Image: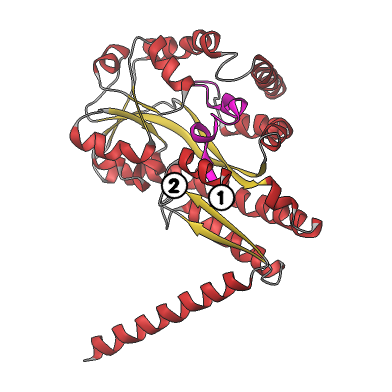
């Protein structure tokens, strides 16, 4: 009897909470419907909910967000299409997903480009004005850049050499011409798939090697099938929080500034959360019988050298020569400064 009463109380509380949320959204003078493929309960959605709550508080409830998480609005391409017809007003996009709209945004995802998060932070800060302008030209307001972190190759069997990698069935993110071209440069024909399709493909054996951050592999459950991680970062993965620029511009300027300020606060905290989660996830993976494999040092050099060949192949189509030159110049400047 006690448990029945307790269950009834919980249902009442849940109903009241939903009623309150619906009421709060109904009262919002400016309501943004946004979506993301990030699962509910992940650090990305948790921190975004904190952002939403503060925006609502600071606007006295006039600015609200209805969040569709976990990919229920489809992948990045589907989300963007729904923004174009007004069904959505924004979203959290991966670099690969939104790169088809703003190709230059892909440039930081070149494999083996960055050596540290310090390099990432420096280049990202300097490129922000270019990215923001490029998105605005497409009717999008860049609210924040998000982070997945450094990604690793993860496989169903141990891979320590390039020869072993070539024998594997390798995945590449769909609509990611840089990763696809890079793998092709290595002599690998990857299988392009959207992120939501990866786990099923691992389960059926359609793919055997994938790429993700350590935390991302846990959140998306890929680690249940990929029990081996090549212990060297393959590249850097990131994304963007974007809003429909036309709808955003209808906000009073004070609200626009407040949203930017609040986003800077919470998405900076998210970056810290993400990096800590990736660090902690190494031990979590090892506790779940995932092995860290040391790659052959000679092959690591080959993998790094193939970056430049890949850039020659995709420059001008995957991203502009201008943004690549700016990125490399910034990276060189930072390395010179820190080497003194």
Identify residue for label 1: 270
Identify residue for label 2: 37
Point 49% across, 35% down: residue = 97
188 is within the stretch colored magenta: no
Q: Position of residue 186 (x, y in %)?
A: 38, 11
Magenta region: 87-113
Q: Nearer the viewer, residue 333 or 103?
A: 103
Q: Is residue 121 left or right of residue 43?
A: right
Q: Position of residue 46 (x, y in %)?
A: 50, 58
Q: Quadrant of the N terminus?
A: bottom left
- Looking at marks 1 and 2 on the same chain, the residue that comes earlier in the sequence is marked by 2
Point 26% across, 28% down: residue = 207
Residue 142 lies in quadrant: top right
Check disc 1 and report its element: helix, strand or loop. Answer: helix
Q: Is residue 310 left or right of residue 156?
A: right
- Whether residue 195 appears in this view of the structure is yes
Residue 15 lies in quadrant: bottom left
Q: Position of residue 318 (x, y in %)?
A: 55, 19
Q: Position of residue 38 (x, y in %)?
A: 44, 48
Q: Residues within 10 Å of mark 2 (few under 14, many from 20)?
A: many
Q: Quadrant of the C terminus?
A: top right
Q: Residue furthest bottom?
A: 1
């Amino acid at each position: 009897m006690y448990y029945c009463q307790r269950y009834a109380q919980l249902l009442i509380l849940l109903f009241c909470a939903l009623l309150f949320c619906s009421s709060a959204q109904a009262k919002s003078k400016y309501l943004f419907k946004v979506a993301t493929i990030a699962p509910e309960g992940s650090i990305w959605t948790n921190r975004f909910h904190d952002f939403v709550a503060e925006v609502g508080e600071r606007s006295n409830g006039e600015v609200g967000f209805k969040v569709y998480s976990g990919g229920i609005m489809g992948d990045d391409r589907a989300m963007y299409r729904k923004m174009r017809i007004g069904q959505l007003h924004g979203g959290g996009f991966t670099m690969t997903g939104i790169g088809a709209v703003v190709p230059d945004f892909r440039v930081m995802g070149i494999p083996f480009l960055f050596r540290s998060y310090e390099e990432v932070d420096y280049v990202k800060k300097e490129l922000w004005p270019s990215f923001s302008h490029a998105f605005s030209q497409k009717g999008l307001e860049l609210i924040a850049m998000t982070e997945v972190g450094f990604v690793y190759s993860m496989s169903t069997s141990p891979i320590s050499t390039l020869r072993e990698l070539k024998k594997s069935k390798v995945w590449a993110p769909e609509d990611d011409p840089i990763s696809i071209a890079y793998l092709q440069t290595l002599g690998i024909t990857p299988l392009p798939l959207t992120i939501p399709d990866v786990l099923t493909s691992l389960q059926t054996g359609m793919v055997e090697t994938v790429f993700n951050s350590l935390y991302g592999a846990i959140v998306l459950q890929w680690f249940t099938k990929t029990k081996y991680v090549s212990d060297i970062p393959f590249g850097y993965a990131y994304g963007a929080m974007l809003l429909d620029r036309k709808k955003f511009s209808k906000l009073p300027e004070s609200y626009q500034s407040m949203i930017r300020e609040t986003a800077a606060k919470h998405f900076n905290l998210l970056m810290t959360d993400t990096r800590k989660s990736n660090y902690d996830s190494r031990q979590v993976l090892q506790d779940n019988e995932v092995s860290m494999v040391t790659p052959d040092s000679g092959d690591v050099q080959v993998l790094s050298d193939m970056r430049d060949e890949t850039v020659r192949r995709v420059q001008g189509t995957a991203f502009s020569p201008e943004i690549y030159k700016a990125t490399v110049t910034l990276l060189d400047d930072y390395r010179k400064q820190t080497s003194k």
